[in-house]
Image (tube, rainbow, N blue to C red):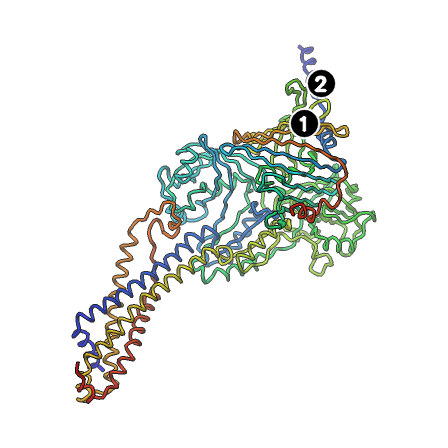
């Protein structure tokens, strides 16, 4: 009997210590995904809504994390072409081609009438937003799991700041390289709101970058968005790009 | 004088048919004038008491947290509510107003809805009955909104129920934003379905405001936008708004509490500091850092060197802040990351931590702190302090605006300038509901001009009739002048005749007007989705005649008729008796 208890205890201790700390996983993910260079890419967003058909947005995206800047230029559909969004530090503007005006907007406003928002395009570290979730015993909630044939850590995090969309998330992260393969977002009431699947990756300067993602609306079944990133360039972007004048000139 | 009255009254009876027809015309004109006036006034009452009250309140106190206009919350609610009740004794009531955009999923159907709060608990029974009369229930009971045994009971319009394919007792799932901006999902239960009185009531779903506050994450001392209803809004709204503006001036915000790290605790005053460039530059000029390479950044949290020594902290360390709330049972706490250590001086003493306003307000609003100025150990900067202008107030009181355009501009600026803390603004209906008020003015103008045109036509009839009467009585005038009647008496005879005719007609017209209004207002009008329904009161046309306006219109009609009669009467009195007697037709 004592032996059985000791074996079980050893197994449980072993299983607790078999997992890395969630904080360290989050830090690894942050390091992996943070941009050390400027980036330019083309982003295609296809959004499917129940009874509304599909809507496709095409945009060119410039980002420079050193001064928290990004620029989005809409290329399609036709009615959005020439419109843009510019973030410089704490300021975020929307540019309307028709009226040739810039308007201050919030980070949580829609991009091109889609479900994508300004803060989806900015760099904000996971460790700044989330902390490990713990169970009733105070243990971090992390287990092994598999997605297809890939072995992953499945762990839960809780928001440590209010300005996030979801207070609870579950991540499925590759054990071998901490690449996020799936995430599930929950509301405060515990309802599964959205699942995100990271479907394709490309390697740039030794880092895996997701180039195809699927976002499934779990609240309203049938709504989903596919984001595809192509033409990624990590060359230094000219300072002039992150200016209002550049955005205006592009629309002329 | 009596004989003039007798002659005038007798003359009225001499030309019965003509005077009857003229009297009918004047009575009809009076009837139309009084009914139009009462209808116009009735619309005003409906607009002011049944639309403006719900759209913007006669006076409103508005809140916006961190520049987010969807986060309409104030965290020291009881204080503001008590102040409003004390300072505005002339108010009819004060209610919180809330509307939350949501995505609703019914039985296989989904749609956008606005969840609107209805306050059943804070008013008296009359208030609840007033609210109830706006909803013509098809199924369920309006008062079930307050039934705590049902999970978040709601009532919705029959159109919305049909679109979402739901009936009584069905569950609707909704997705919406909490006041902190997070996505939330909840279940609401159909407690009843009503027939909307107008198009504006078709879209929202209504639930008890306390349920809505709980669903959207309001704390026990949080309040939403306040709508204040007045008995005499036209007279009082602006004065009361100005008075509240003065009373809502914030004090300096501060916290006196424990700061701790790794088991070491010390007491300190924590003040917020504005993050704009001018304020940061002023602070940088006023204090010196132990490390000269430190700058005052937007996310600065700076601590005095003596306090840093006690706590054994350095730049980059995170310290915990705990403090007592003014509300029993609540405690405030949070974390801030030290970015610099300063040397205390006369302006900023030793037991002080200055925190950037974003982090400071997070702490301050986590549980409204006890008044820090009451604590003798606390550092309380006075207005002569060189840094007084950079310290954060309890909230940001926005200046009063005069027009809707200014109000819209101000709201845009609050969002774009990312004002930290809660922005508070006071608005009267003249700024916030000017569209409704303009509609009222337009209706008044249309009514007035239409009635005046009608009345002008009737007056032409009066003049014509008088001229005919005088012409017919020319020989009679000659006779009475020949037997000694004075010119003035002749003139007065005609004037008094018109006076009596118009007075009797106007009074008769008024009596008929009241009868007609009574009958018309009993007719039930089913406006359906027609926007005209917003001008109805509980499905009926609403007439609101006032004693002053009725008396005024009668006097106006009599005065116009008498003044119209004056000139033909004077002409008649000026006839010489010989000439008048020679008159023959």
Q: Which residue is mark 2?
A: A14
Q: Which residue is mark 1?
A: A180
Can the viewer see residue A162 in this picture? no
Q: Is residue A213 left or right of residue B218?
A: right
Q: Secondary structure at mark 1?
A: strand
Q: In front here: A198 or B221?
A: A198
User: Residue B111: image x %, image y %?
Assistant: 47, 37
User: Residue B469: image x %, image y %?
Assistant: 21, 77
Same chain letter for marks 1 and 2: yes
**With respect to residue A67, does B440 lie above or below?**
below
**Quadrant of image for the C terminus of chain B:** bottom left
Q: Is residue B32 left or right of residue B314?
A: left
Q: Secondary structure at mark 2?
A: helix
Numbered circle sitting on residue B533: none
Using a 10 Å C-alpha cutoff, classify the residue at mark 2 as few (fewer than 14 neighbours), some (14 to 19) or many (20 or more): few
The mark tally for this picture is: 2
Distance between mark 1 and mark 2 Cα atoms: 25 Å
User: Residue A140: image x %, image y %?
Assistant: 67, 26
* Residue at point 65%, 46% (across, down): A251
Q: In front here: B354 or B44?
A: B44
User: Residue A240: image x %, image y %?
Assistant: 74, 46
**With respect to residue B161, does B51 lie above or below?**
below
Q: In front here: B271 or B13?
A: B13
Residue at the outermost front position: A252
Using a 10 Å C-alpha cutoff, classify the residue at mark 1 as few (fewer than 14 neighbours), some (14 to 19) or many (20 or more): many
Q: Is residue B84 left or right of residue B48?
A: right
């Amino acid at each position: 009997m004592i032996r059985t208890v000791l074996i079980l205890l050893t197994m449980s201790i072993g299983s607790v210590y078999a997992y890395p700390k969630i904080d360290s996983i989050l830090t690894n993910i942050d390091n992996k995904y943070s941009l050390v260079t400027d980036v330019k890419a083309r982003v295609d967003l296809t959004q499917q809504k129940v009874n509304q058909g599909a809507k496709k947005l095409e945009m060119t995206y410039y980002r420079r994390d050193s001064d928290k800047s990004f620029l989005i230029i809409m290329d399609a559909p036709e009615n959005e072409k020439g419109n843009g969004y510019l973030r410089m530090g704490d300021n975020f503007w929307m540019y309307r081609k028709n009226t040739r005006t810039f308007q201050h907007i919030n980070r949580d406003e829609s991009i091109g009438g889609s479900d994508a928002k300004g803060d989806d395009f900015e760099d904000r570290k996971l460790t700044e937003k989330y902390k490990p979730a713990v169970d009733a015993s105070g243990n971090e909630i992390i287990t092994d799991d598999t997605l297809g044939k890939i072995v992953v850590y499945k762990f839960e995090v809780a928001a440590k700041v209010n300005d996030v969309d979801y207070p609870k998330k579950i991540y499925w992260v590759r054990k071998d390289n901490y690449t996020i393969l799936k995430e599930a977002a929950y509301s405060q009431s515990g309802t599964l709101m959205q699942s995100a699947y990271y479907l394709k990756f490309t390697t740039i300067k030794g880092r895996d970058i997701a180039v195809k993602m699927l976002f499934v609306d779990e609240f309203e079944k049938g709504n989903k968005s596919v984001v595809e990133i192509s033409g990624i360039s990590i060359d230094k972007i000219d300072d002039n790009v992150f200016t209002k004048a550049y955005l205006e000139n592009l629309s002329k | 004088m009596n004989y003039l009255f007798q002659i005038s009254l007798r003359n009225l009876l001499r030309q019965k048919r003509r005077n009857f027809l003229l009297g009918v015309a004047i009575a009809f004109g009076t009837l139309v004038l009084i009914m139009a006036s009462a209808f116009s006034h009735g619309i005003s009452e409906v607009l002011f008491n049944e639309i403006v009250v719900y759209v913007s309140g006669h006076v409103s106190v508005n809140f916006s947290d961190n520049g987010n206009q969807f986060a309409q919350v104030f965290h020291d609610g009881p204080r503001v509510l008590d102040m409003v009740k004390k300072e505005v004794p002339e108010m009819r009531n004060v209610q919180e107003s809330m509307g939350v955009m949501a995505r609703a999923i019914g039985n296989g159907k989904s749609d956008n809805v606005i969840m609107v709060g209805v306050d059943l608990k804070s008013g008296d029974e009359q208030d609840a009955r007033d609210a109830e009369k706006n909803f013509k229930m098809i199924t369920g009971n309006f008062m079930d909104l307050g039934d705590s045994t049902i999970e978040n009971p709601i009532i919705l319009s029959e159109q919305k129920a049909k679109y979402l394919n739901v009936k009584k007792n069905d569950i609707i799932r909704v997705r919406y934003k909490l006041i902190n901006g997070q996505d939330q999902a909840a279940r609401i239960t159909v407690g009843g379905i009503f027939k909307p009185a107008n198009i504006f009531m078709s879209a929202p779903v209504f639930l008890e405001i306390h349920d809505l506050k709980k669903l959207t994450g309001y704390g026990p001392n949080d309040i939403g936008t306040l709508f204040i209803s007045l008995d005499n809004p036209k007279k009082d709204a602006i004065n009361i708004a100005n008075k509240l503006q003065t009373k809502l001036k914030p004090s300096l915000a501060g916290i006196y509490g424990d700061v701790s790290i790794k088991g070491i605790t010390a007491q300190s005053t924590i003040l917020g500091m504005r993050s704009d460039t001018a304020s940061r530059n002023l602070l940088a000029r006023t204090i010196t850092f132990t490390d000269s390479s430190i700058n005052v950044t937007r996310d600065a949290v700076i601590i005095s060197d003596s306090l840093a020594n006690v706590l054994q902290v350095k730049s980059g360390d995170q310290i915990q802040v705990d403090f007592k709330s003014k509300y029993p049972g609540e405690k405030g706490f949070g974390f801030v990351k030290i970015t610099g250590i300063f040397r205390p001086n006369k302006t900023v003493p030793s037991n002080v931590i200055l925190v950037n306003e974003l982090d400071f307000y997070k702490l301050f609003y986590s549980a409204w702190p006890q008044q820090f100025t009451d604590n003798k150990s606390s550092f309380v900067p006075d207005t002569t302090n060189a840094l007084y202008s950079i310290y954060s107030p309890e909230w940001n009181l926005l200046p009063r605006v005069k027009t809707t355009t200014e109000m819209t501009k101000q709201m845009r600026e609050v969002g774009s300038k990312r004002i930290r803390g809660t922005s508070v603004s006071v608005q009267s209906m003249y700024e916030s509901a000017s569209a409704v008020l303009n509609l009222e003015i337009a209706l008044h103008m249309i009514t007035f001009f239409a009635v005046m045109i009608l009345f002008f036509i009737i007056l032409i009839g009066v003049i014509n009739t008088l001229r005919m009467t005088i012409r017919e009585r020319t020989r009679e005038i000659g006779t009475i002048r020949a037997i000694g009647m004075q010119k003035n008496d002749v003139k007065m005879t005609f004037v008094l005749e018109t006076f009596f005719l118009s007075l009797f007609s106007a009074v008769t017209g008024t009596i008929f007007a009241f009868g007609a209004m009574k009958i018309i207002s009993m007719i039930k009008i089913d406006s359906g989705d027609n926007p005209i329904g917003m001008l109805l009161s509980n499905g009926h046309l609403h007439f609101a005649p006032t004693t002053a306006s009725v008396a005024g219109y009668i006097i106006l009609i009599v005065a116009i008729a008498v003044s119209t009669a004056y000139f033909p009467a004077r002409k008649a009195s000026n006839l010489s008796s010989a000439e008048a007697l020679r008159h023959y037709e």
